[in-house]
Amino acid sequence: MGGAVSAGEDNDELIDNLKEAQYIRSDLVEHAFRAIDRADYYLEEFRDSAYKDLAWRHGNIHLSAPCIYSEVMEALDLQPGLSFLNLGSGTGYLSTMVGLILGEFIENIKKEENDRRNEGSVLVIETPVNLLRERILSLPLPEPLKMYLLYYREK
């Protein structure tokens, strides 16, 4: 998924493109995206792809496309003081941006069996996929967010 906007030369240009395409609509989401350079979540040899609006995977490291993250963050209507649980948080890129919006009293907890890369990501809960699917579908969330959660959890 991704490719909805043209690639940027740097993080700010990527964010400008996401704003122009109406993926980023709120100031809070824009500030979070600008504060966290996407390239910092890439392996050094792949950083030339960091500012493309594309998902990236290398081994067990995965980043969704920036347009997907922006849609999720806008749909959640994030505000300081709210709570956020990210199951299967991967690199922690989304959790870090969300944490900037939620405020200073956040706690990132992480547990992963094959942890070689993630520090400070949110708790990963390993439950059977079918049980997790039922729980996600029962949540009072917008359908696109449910599909996002299901798609990446079931891979």
Image (cartoon, rainbow, N blue to C red):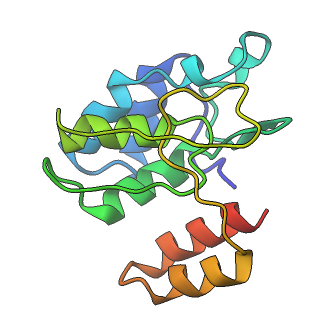
Residue 31 percent across, percent down from the top left: 26, 32
Residue 29 percent across, percent down from the top left: 29, 43
The residue depicted at 35 percent of the width and 26 percent of the height is: 34
Please state, as top left, top right, bottom left or bottom right, where the N terminus lies in the image: bottom right
Q: Residue furthest right?
A: 59
Left or right of residue 106: residue 62: right
**Viewer-side residue, 88 vs 125:** 125
Please state, as top left, top right, bottom left or bottom right, where the C terminus lies in the image: bottom right
Quarter assignment of residue 73 = bottom left
Quarter assignment of residue 45 = top right
Left or right of residue 155: residue 141: left
Residue 60 percent across, percent down from the top left: 80, 39
The answer to whether 142 is drawn above or below residue 24 in the figure is: below
The residue depicted at 18 percent of the width and 37 percent of the height is: 105
**Viewer-side residue, 36 vs 88:** 88
The residue depicted at 31 percent of the width and 34 percent of the height is: 32
The answer to whether 136 is drawn above or below residue 78 in the figure is: below
The residue depicted at 35 percent of the width and 84 percent of the height is: 140
The answer to whether 27 is drawn above or below residue 84 in the figure is: above
**Viewer-side residue, 76 vs 82:** 82
The answer to whether 9 is drawn above or below residue 26 in the figure is: above
